[in-house]
Image (tube, rainbow, N blue to C red):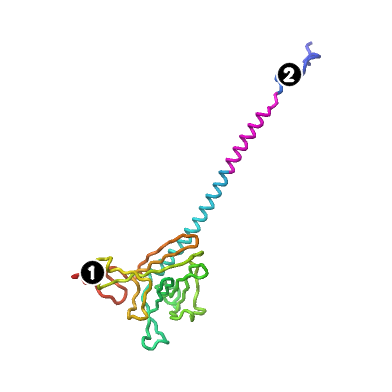
């Protein structure tokens, strides 16, 4: 009968497997650690770059949303701006004055609005200006010629934040000029109505917003009913024979 146990004097492990133990050398450990560190550094760099890219995307998305809100508000106000006159109790010679204040940094005008409440009417009165580094629209449903008297009948909406300045320019029509378009179109920094008889609106309004971070955006909108051959309200047709 043959025994399954090894004979005395022979190593058991060597008899069973025939494999010798082998330990890692110092050079192999250093190489493995170096490769691991390189992989970890690459992963860290990739994750950091991904985080920065995502942060930029979020910032640009917020800026884009802000521009969309501002664009919609300006489009609603400027495209529907209409001439409007109101009685000034403090003025004896000219009791009816146009409801418009159009300077280089403030615009106050009337515009047509969707009728939500019959008591409020379909005309809104708004002032665009910069307050505390915000571009603010102040609304009212009543034509207060002196904006300080609006009191509780006003509400405000912040259209853009971190704004440095806002500037307005107003397109006017020179009917005495030649037929050349560039000669007929005039750009004014202010729309003067106090010392003149005109009660109309600018043909178009150019709004330029300067942000504190250096960004600049401009919007050009034509006021309601004003075109090359037409004006809202009283107007004189262009003489085609000249």
**Dot label at residue 146:** none
Q: Is residue 2 left or right of residue 158?
A: right
Q: Position of residue 96 (x, y in %)?
A: 37, 84
Label 1 crowd (10 A; few <14 / some 14-19 / many >=20): few
* Structural distance between the alpha carbons of marks 2 and 1: 112 Å
Closer to us: 28 or 100: 28
Magenta residues span: 22-44
Residue for badge 1? 178
Label 2 crowd (10 A; few <14 / some 14-19 / many >=20): few
Image position of 81 with respect to 86: above or below: above
Residue for badge 2? 16
Q: Is residue 41 magenta?
A: yes
In the figure, residue 227 lies in which quadrant? bottom left
Q: Is residue 218 magenta?
A: no
At x 71%, y 23%, the residue is 21
Label 2 sits on a secondary structure element that is helix
Name the mark nearer the viewer: 2 or 1. Answer: 1
At x 36%, y 86%, the residue is 94
Q: Position of residue 158 (x, y in %)?
A: 50, 68
Q: Position of residue 174 (x, y in %)?
A: 28, 72
Image position of 12 with respect to 83: above or below: above
Q: Is residue 12 left or right of residue 192?
A: right
Location of the C terminus (image quadrant): bottom left
Look at the numbered discs 2 and 1 and tell me whether their residues touch, using CB distance below 8 Å.
no
Label 1 sits on a secondary structure element that is loop
Looking at marks 2 and 1 on the same chain, the residue that comes earlier in the sequence is marked by 2
In the figure, residue 46 lies in which quadrant? top right
């Amino acid at each position: 009968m043959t025994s399954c146990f090894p004979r005395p004097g022979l190593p058991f492990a060597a008899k069973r497997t025939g494999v010798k133990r082998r330990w890692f050398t110092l050079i192999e450990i250093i190489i493995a650690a170096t490769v691991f560190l390189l992989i970890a550094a690459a992963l860290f760099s990739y994750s950091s770059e991904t985080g920065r890219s995502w942060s930029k995307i979020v910032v640009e998305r917020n800026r884009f949303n802000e521009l969309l809100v501002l664009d919609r508000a300006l489009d609603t106000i400027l495209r529907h701006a209409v001439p409007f006159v109101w009685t000034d109790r403090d003025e004896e010679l000219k009791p009816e004055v146009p409801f418009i204040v159009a300077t280089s940094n403030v615009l106050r005008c009337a515009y047509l609005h969707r009728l939500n409440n019959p008591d409020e009417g379909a005309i809104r009165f708004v002032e665009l200006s910069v307050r505390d580094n915000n571009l603010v629209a102040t609304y009212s449903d009543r034509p207060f010629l002196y904006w300080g008297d609006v009191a509780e009948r006003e509400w405000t909406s912040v259209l853009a934040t971190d704004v440095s300045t806002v500037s307005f320019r107003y397109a006017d029509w020179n009917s005495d000029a030649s037929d050349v378009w560039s000669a007929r179109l005039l750009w004014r920094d202010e729309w003067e109505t106090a010392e003149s008889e005109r009660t109309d609106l600018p043909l178009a309004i150019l709004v330029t917003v300067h942000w504190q971070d250096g960004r600049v955006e401009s919007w050009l909108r034509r006021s309601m009913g004003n075109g090359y051959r037409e004006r809202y309200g009283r107007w004189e047709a262009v003489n085609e024979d000249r």
